[in-house]
Amino acid sequence: MFKSLKSAISSLGLSNGVLYLLGRAMQAVSGGRWFLVRYYLVAQPVPNPFVPVCRPSENDRVVEIDRQNPIVKTFPRPSAVIQNRFEKGLVCLAATSKQTFSGFLWFARGAYDEDEVHCRFVLANPDTMVWDFDVYVEPQFRLGRTFARLWDAANEQFSSSGIQWSISRISAFNQQSLQSHERLGIRRLNSLTFVCLGGLQIGFMSCSPYLNICTKDINRPVVVIDSLDPLT
């Protein structure tokens, strides 16, 4: 136990390391019915004017798709989840390498309903902000340029429509994701911690509403992103 705590603190820091192990213990004791998640809300600047990071490639492409695209069947997510996203008007950019699915990036305008916990994120300035989520790259393409190509396609679309910032949440326990996004110039805005005990959820946030208690989707917290002041 001490070795695990030392390792977690070494990689995640004191507070995140302790919370990570607490969450693991909760899951083990409850058989997965209890869990703890901690997010950082981050803002990523959209380059303007847009300058691509990757050179064009005939073999590697990123395009916006709809639910009718056959590539949707290969997505590593439950089909009901994917169809629900399209029904809500969420946008999917899909990457392929030699016509093989290699990754995707999703984004929403105006608001986004989190699907891991009960929480709604609202963008106060939808003309200049967008919400990105579920940026995924297939394992065999993670050492290549797929991640960069996805962001090239997203930033090109964002820049052309006047978007200045892409907002998202990243797990405080996912150092690899944080480091990848830090290379893109993210600004940390707020931290949010959710303790989920079956149907009961308790949220602790560094922004309004600060504290929230909800059961399933009743009285879920609504977090409004209206400031880009960095987290201190």
Image: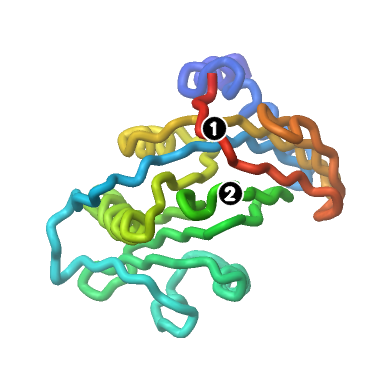
Q: Which mark is residue 154?
A: none
| Category of crowding for the residue at label 2, using alpha-carbon neighbours closer than 10 angstroms: few (below 14), some (14–19), many (at least 20) | many
Tag 2 secondary structure: strand
- Residue at image x 21%, y 72%? 98
| Category of crowding for the residue at label 1, using alpha-carbon neighbours closer than 10 angstroms: few (below 14), some (14–19), many (at least 20) | many
Which residue lies under the disc numbered 1? 172
Q: Is residue 211 visible?
A: yes
Tag 1 secondary structure: loop
Q: x, y (%) of residue 41?
A: 55, 37
Which residue lies under the disc numbered 2? 123
214 versus 161 height, above or below: above
Q: Nearer the viewer, residue 102 or 170?
A: 170
Residue 100 location, quadrant? bottom left
Residue 47 falls left or right of residue 178: left
Q: CA distance from mark 2 to mark 1?
A: 21 Å
- Residue at image x 60%, y 75%? 87
- Residue at image x 45%, y 76%? 72
Q: Nearer the viewer, residue 214 or 196?
A: 214
Q: Is residue 141 visible?
A: no
Q: x, y (%) of residue 201?
A: 80, 42
Earlier sequence position, callout 2 versus callout 1:
2
- Residue at image x 23%, y 52%? 145
40 versus 119 height, above or below: above
Q: Amino acid at mark 1?
A: Ala
